[in-house]
Structures are given as structure tokens and as C-alpha cells.
Amino acid sequence: MADDWRDWPYTPGDWVYRQDARGSIALFGVPGADAQFTIRCDRQAGAIYLSRAGAANAPLQVRTSTLLRSLAAQPTGGTSSYVAAVVTPRDTVLDAIAFSRGRFVVQQAGATTLVLPSWAEIGRVVEDCRR
């Protein structure tokens, strides 16, 4: 793998945007499989959840073209193993992810590094929660 994270190959998959009773969600993954990463707006809770598949009990490290940030993550308790970090809709990490130059990276000890494209679906979820 190249030394510079901006040259790392993308994790295979695509973003999909959906709305539901809780708010909206952007899911990243390979079609037909469970999502590898999600960004969910929960309007009632007034929160955005950044979730990744897995059960590693370690912080999520988010790297963008303008920011490197560690977020505490907890198991979600669902039937599929996911861990999630919770942020407020106005947290600057969300803008950094949405406007990162082409990609952002999610790393977690004990889990595979995710190199994700910065597509419009991310910004749509963030804006849904900021209304």
C-alpha cells in the first residue's frame, strides 16, 4: 500500500441514500451485502451515527483532507455486529467528511481500514439532520 492515504485504493462498494421513519441514512457497501459503513441521521435523537461493520471495541479514527479525529465507538447491539460513534448534526467532522477531497478513511484497531469516496449521499444525510 502507498505511504500517502490519499493514494490508497478505495474499498469496493457504492453509497446508497435512503429515508425512513427515523430520518435518513447513507449506506456504503457492495450491493446485495450488509453495509460496511453507514451515516445515519436520527432526527428524534438529534444525532448522527457513524457506524462500521465489526465488533472491535476501539475508537474510530476518521481521516479527511482537512482533519484527523478519533471518535469513541460502542457496539450497537443489533443482530449484525456494528460499532457506532455518535456526533451532533453540527459537528465539524461531518463537514470534513462531506467535503474531503475525493475520499476519507475510517480506521479502527482490530478492523480493516475503510477508504471511502466522499459522495453526495453523505452531505444529504448531514443536511437532513441540520434542518
Image (cartoon, helix red, strand yellow):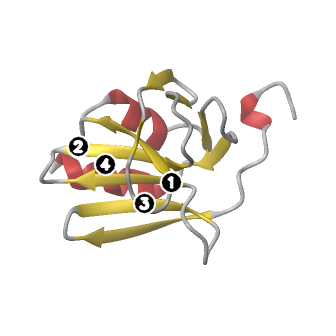
- Using the image as rendered, state which of residue 119 and residue 23 is in the foreground: 23
Amino acid carrying label 2: it is Ala
Q: CA distance from mark 4 to mark 2?
A: 10 Å
Q: Secondary structure at mark 4?
A: helix
Q: Residues within 10 Å of mark 2 (few under 14, many from 20)?
A: some
Q: Earlier in the sequence, mark 3 or mark 4?
A: 3
Residue 47 x/y as whole percent = 23, 43
- Using the image as rendered, state which of residue 118 and residue 36 is in the foreground: 36
Mark whose residue sits in front, 1 or 4: 1
Q: CA distance from mark 1 to mark 4?
A: 24 Å
Residue drawn at (25%, 71%), measured in percent from left and top?
20
Please determine whether, in this image, residue 105 is positioned above or below residue 52.
above
- Using the image as rendered, state which of residue 125 and residue 86 is in the foreground: 86
Q: Earlier in the sequence, mark 3 or mark 1?
A: 3
Q: For mark 1, what is the residue?
A: 81
Residue drawn at (61%, 72%), measured in percent from left and top?
33
Residue 13 x/y as whole percent = 65, 63
Horizontal relation, residue 126 to residue 66: left or right: left
Q: Earlier in the sequence, mark 3 or mark 2?
A: 3
Amino acid carrying label 4: it is Val
Q: For mark 2, what is the residue?
A: 47
Mark whose residue sits in front, 3 or 1: 1
Q: CA distance from mark 3 to mark 4?
A: 10 Å
Please determine whether, in this image, residue 81 is positioned above or below residue 112.
below
Q: Secondary structure at mark 3?
A: strand
Residue drawn at (30%, 30%), measured in percent from left and top?
91
Q: For mark 4, what is the residue?
A: 126
Q: Earlier in the sequence, mark 2 or mark 1?
A: 2
Q: For mark 3, what is the residue?
A: 26
